[in-house]
């Protein structure tokens, strides 16, 4: 398991070599990873083994939904729902279909979320994982529908739901229909909650806009990865409105926890274990 | 009904004499008592809530309010609520549920306020909670968009059994200005974005979002607030009648379905 693997993973780079790398200032991208936060350079192999977290500063880099599943649920346990769902172009928005075709080819995804059933340490969960590589994880019809269906499946089958969120917000190209997905996902989450079932959201980088203002925030337990960006409005929008500089840790997971909107901050390599424990704690005898 | 473009409607709803919630409340409701505060943090001037009679029936009224002048706008933060505004709305809605009063929401907002304090106090959570709680509120909820329906900030008062729009009102996921700056990196092209976004009552009826369109006075509500108010009243009377006669399960299931069915996708 990855969390166990971590203990044997160490930065093979010593300080000298790092400084040398910095001097050269062109890190071979396919072999090395340079942390955007602390500029530490590690072998990509080691970085990958460490769940794509910087071993020096604990920076949790953005990862794809497939990678997220790999790090978060039991191996080969994931069975995907609604694999073939793709969105239409309800507003006839210029370029929207082309953009999607291009992204589908590039990412292998059909939209910004994958949902399904999986296990964590053997505990069955319904899981949704958003993917910021697909239109910034924005929520349109497909995201809204898949998430609603996932909640409905979980309600029907009395299962807990875990949602890994990352999103730039609503999907402008689907106009008002994308706004309605906020209400729709909350509706499905409400029925799941009403049935006495557990919902955990795990906010990852970045969780913003219409996703923060809908299903991501109504979970029984809100978890965040360390230092990720979580907020309603974008930084630039706020800076533009108030014309002042924002505090350093503004809209970080820690900022949200301090203000009472996040229950716990959990490192990526501990998430599977944490989820398994929390699910067990809610099991009815 | 007129055949104006979205831009032309934008001009109408931005008219300086466009009636606001404060103009409509005394005409549509009797003995309106305003109630203040969310019992958690404070009282948000961008959201007015209270109780009163609508044609003899006790109702709870919750509105986002824009000012008619600078002073009023300062007090109401130009109609952009902070989290405490949404939490006040929810408190009053839950009270309506307790006393079995229908809820009438009148919405005119460019959106939820974007600022440091709004983030600190959980703007996203406040809106999200309203979406979830209004969905299960055990009393009819009727929402009328009066002017601007600005994104999540409007939706927080628009999870309802029926959504009506004044004929010139606009309801959008993003402001035309915001859309223009994303699309073309040029906020001044908002008039173009206005058409692209499909945000009129007519568009939203096609998408199954808007259930009724309420006529305004000839040329726009600013020409005759009273006639427009009468039209809103006439609509509300019918809407309440339609929804009050539903059983609770029927009401809640239909509300669920109203939102649940919205989405344009295919399965390949
Ligand atoms: Zn680092």
Image: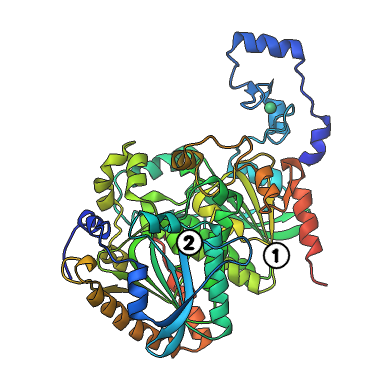
Q: Are marks 2 and 1 on the same chain?
A: no
Q: Are marks 2 and 1 in contact (CB under 8 Å)?
A: no
- Rate crowding at label 2 as few (under 14), some (14 to 19) or many (20 or more) other CA atoms within 10 Å: many
Is B210 above or below relative to A4? below
**How many C-alpha atoms fall within 10 Å of the one at disc 1: few (<14), some, or many (≥20)?**
many
Q: Is residue A169 visible from the viewing direction of this image?
A: yes
Q: Residue at x 70, y 48 (%)?
A: A258
Residue topped by disc 2: B45
Give the quadrant of residue B87. bottom right
Badge number at residue A71: none
Left or right, residue A73 beside residue B236: right
The subunit carrying tag 1 is A
Disc 2 under 8 Å from ligand 1? The reply is no
Q: Quadrant of residue B71?
A: bottom left
Q: Secondary structure at mark 2?
A: loop
What quarter of the picture does the N terminus of chain B occupy? bottom left
Chain letter for mark 2: B
Residue A198 numbered tag: 1
Q: Quadrant of the C terminus of chain B?
A: bottom left
Task: Say left or right for B7 vs A180.
Answer: left
């Amino acid at each position: 398991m990855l969390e166990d693997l971590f203990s044997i993973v160490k930065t093979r780079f010593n300080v000298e070599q790092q400084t040398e790398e910095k001097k050269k200032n062109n890190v071979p991208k396919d072999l090395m990873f340079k942390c955007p936060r602390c500029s530490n350079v590690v072998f990509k192999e080691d970085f990958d083994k460490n769940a794509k977290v910087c071993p020096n500063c604990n920076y949790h880099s953005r990862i794809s939904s497939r990678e997220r599943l790999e790090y978060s649920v039991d191996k080969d346990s994931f069975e995907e729902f609604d694999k073939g769902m793709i969105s239409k172009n309800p507003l006839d928005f210029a370029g929207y279909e082309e953009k999607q075709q291009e992204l589908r080819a590039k990412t292998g995804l059909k939209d910004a979320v994958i949902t399904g059933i999986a296990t964590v340490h053997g505990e069955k969960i319904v899981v949704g994982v958003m993917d910021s590589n697909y239109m910034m994880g924005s929520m349109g019809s497909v995201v809204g529908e898949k998430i609603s269906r996932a909640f409905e499946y979980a309600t029907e089958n009395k299962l807990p739901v875990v949602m890994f969120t990352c999103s730039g917000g609503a999907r402008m190209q689907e106009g008002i229909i994308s706004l309605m997905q906020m209400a729709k996902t909350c509706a499905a989450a409400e029925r799941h909650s009403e049935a006495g079932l557990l919902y955990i959201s795990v906010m990852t980088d970045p969780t913003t806009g219409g996703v923060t203002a809908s299903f991501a925030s109504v979970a029984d337990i809100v978890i965040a990865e360390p230092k990720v960006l979580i907020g309603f409005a974008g930084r630039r929008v706020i800076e533009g409105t108030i014309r002042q500089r924002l505090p350093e840790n503004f809209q970080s997971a820690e900022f949200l926890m301090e203000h009472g909107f996040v229950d716990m901050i959990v490192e990526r390599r501990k998430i599977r274990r944490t989820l398994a424990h929390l699910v067990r704690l809610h099991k009815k005898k | 009904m007129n055949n104006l473009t979205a831009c032309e409607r934008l001009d109408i709803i931005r008219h300086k004499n466009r009636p606001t919630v404060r103009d409509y409340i005394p005409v549509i409701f009797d003995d309106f008592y305003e109630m203040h505060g969310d019992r958690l943090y404070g009282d948000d001037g961008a959201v007015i809530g209270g109780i009163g009679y609508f044609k003899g029936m006790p109702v709870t009224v919750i509105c986002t309010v824009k000012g008619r002048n600078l002073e009023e706008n300062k007090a109401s933060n130009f109609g952009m609520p902070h989290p405490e505004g949404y939490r006040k709305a929810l408190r009053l809605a839950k009270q309506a549920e307790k006393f079995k009063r229908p809820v009438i929401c009148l919405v005119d907002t460019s959106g939820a306020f974007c600022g440091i304090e709004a983030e600190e106090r959980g703007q996203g959570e406040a809106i999200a909670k309203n979406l979830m709680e209004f969905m299960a509120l055990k009393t009819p909820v009727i929402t009328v968009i009066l002017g601007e329906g600005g994104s999540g900030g409007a939706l927080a008062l628009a999870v309802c059994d029926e959504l009506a729009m004044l004929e010139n009102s606009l309801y959008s996921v993003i402001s035309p200005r915001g859309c223009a700056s994303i699309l073309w990196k040029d906020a001044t092209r908002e008039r173009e974005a206005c058409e692209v976004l499909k945000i009129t009552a007519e568009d939203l009826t096609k998408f199954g979002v808007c259930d009724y369109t309420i006529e305004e006075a000839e040329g726009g509500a600013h020409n005759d607030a009273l006639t427009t108010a009468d039209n809103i009243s006439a609509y509300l009377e019918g809407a309440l009648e339609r929804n009050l006669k539903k059983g609770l399960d029927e009401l809640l299931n239909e509300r669920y379905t109203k939102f649940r069915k919205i989405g344009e996708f295919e399965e390949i």
